[in-house]
């Protein structure tokens, strides 16, 4: 590690994995990027620490420049596309879905036009991350909604287009629509039936116990303070932040 490199900066192995897929390469349309690695390190630092953009250490460049570049990449869906590239060969023997609340920092309120995907409960404003993971507990798709959005309302969006052998989810996802959609997609269904169902559905208890992998994935996501608490005013920025965290998780495995 060079003297200018910080303790948590990406390694050479991770950089070699990411660099071929980033914009600003020779031969591409537009300007040539000279500092993609420093820029990504700066974005990772912000999201890992949860610090304001203005507190970005000078070694990562001017905070305003880094922030504007983050927004450009967000708007061009570069973070999303990079995650899709890294999710190359997921193990879809099982597909697990779940959702988790995130507390919204007061500074994240007050976006132009009103708060975006935030709802209030007795603990204050909150938002929700909906996540799908593969059989190894690796994130493959993420959605953001307000905290009061029912988990089951986003289930079909999470599993749409994914060819998995088995769908695992908790009792909150036991709706006729989800069961019919998953069955129509050829998935075995491991979802406990709600207690008020007249006809209880059998499910594989052993497989259901493996659902802890999606809960573990949320623990990994929220190790970055910028994910555990939402600081972004815009939903697009917070979604990009979660996608970047997923990129870091995949890089740790693939590099």
Image (spheres, rainbow, N blue to C red):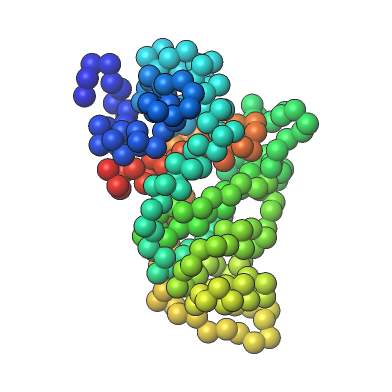
Q: Is residue 40 visible?
A: no
Which residue is farthest right?
113
Looking at the picture, does residue 48 appear above or below residue 222? above
Q: Quadrant of the N terminus?
A: top left
Q: Is residue 141 visible?
A: yes
Which residue is farthest left?
1
Q: Is residue 132 left or right of residue 17?
A: right
Task: Name the one closer to the observer, 193 or 72.
Answer: 72
Labels in figure, total: 0
Which residue is farthest bottom?
199
Percent from the top left, x then y, of residue 4?
A: 27, 16
Residue drawn at (51%, 16%) of the image: 65
Residue 157: quadrant of the picture: bottom right
Percent from the top left, x then y, of residue 20?
A: 35, 36
Q: Is residue 86 left or right of residue 1?
A: right
Percent from the top left, x then y, of residue 251?
A: 34, 43
Q: Is residue 103 left or right of residue 44?
A: right
Q: Quadrant of the C terminus?
A: top left
Residue drawn at (39%, 37%) of the image: 21
Residue drawn at (57%, 58%) of the image: 158
Residue drawn at (39%, 47%) of the image: 86
Percent from the top left, x then y, of residue 225?
A: 47, 34
């Amino acid at each position: 590690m060079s003297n200018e490199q910080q303790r948590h900066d990406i390694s050479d192995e991770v950089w070699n994995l990411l660099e071929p897929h980033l914009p600003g390469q020779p031969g591409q349309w537009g300007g040539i990027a000279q500092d993609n690695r420093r820029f990504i390190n700066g974005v990772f630092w912000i999201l890992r620490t949860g610090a304001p953009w203005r507190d970005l250490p000078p070694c990562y460049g001017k905070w305003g420049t880094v922030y504007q570049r983050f927004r450009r990449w967000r708007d061009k869906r570069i973070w999303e596309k990079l995650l899709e590239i890294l999710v190359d060969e997921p193990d879809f023997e099982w597909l697990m879905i779940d959702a988790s609340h995130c507390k919204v920092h007061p500074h994240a309120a007050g976006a132009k036009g009103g708060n975006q995907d935030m709802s209030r409960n007795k603990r204050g404003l909150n938002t929700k991350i909906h996540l799908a993971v593969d059989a190894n507990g690796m994130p493959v798709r993420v959605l953001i909604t307000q905290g009061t959005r029912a988990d089951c309302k986003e289930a079909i969006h999470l599993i749409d287009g994914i060819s998995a052998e088995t769908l695992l989810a908790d009792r909150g996802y036991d709706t006729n629509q989800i069961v019919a959609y998953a069955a129509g997609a050829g998935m075995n269904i491991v979802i406990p039936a709600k207690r008020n169902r007249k006809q209880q559905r059998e499910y594989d208890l052993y497989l259901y116990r493996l659902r802890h992998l999606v809960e573990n994935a949320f623990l990994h996501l929220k190790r970055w303070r910028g994910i555990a608490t939402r600081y972004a005013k815009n939903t697009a920025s917070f979604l990009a932040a979660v996608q970047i965290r997923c990129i870091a998780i995949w890089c740790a495995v693939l590099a």
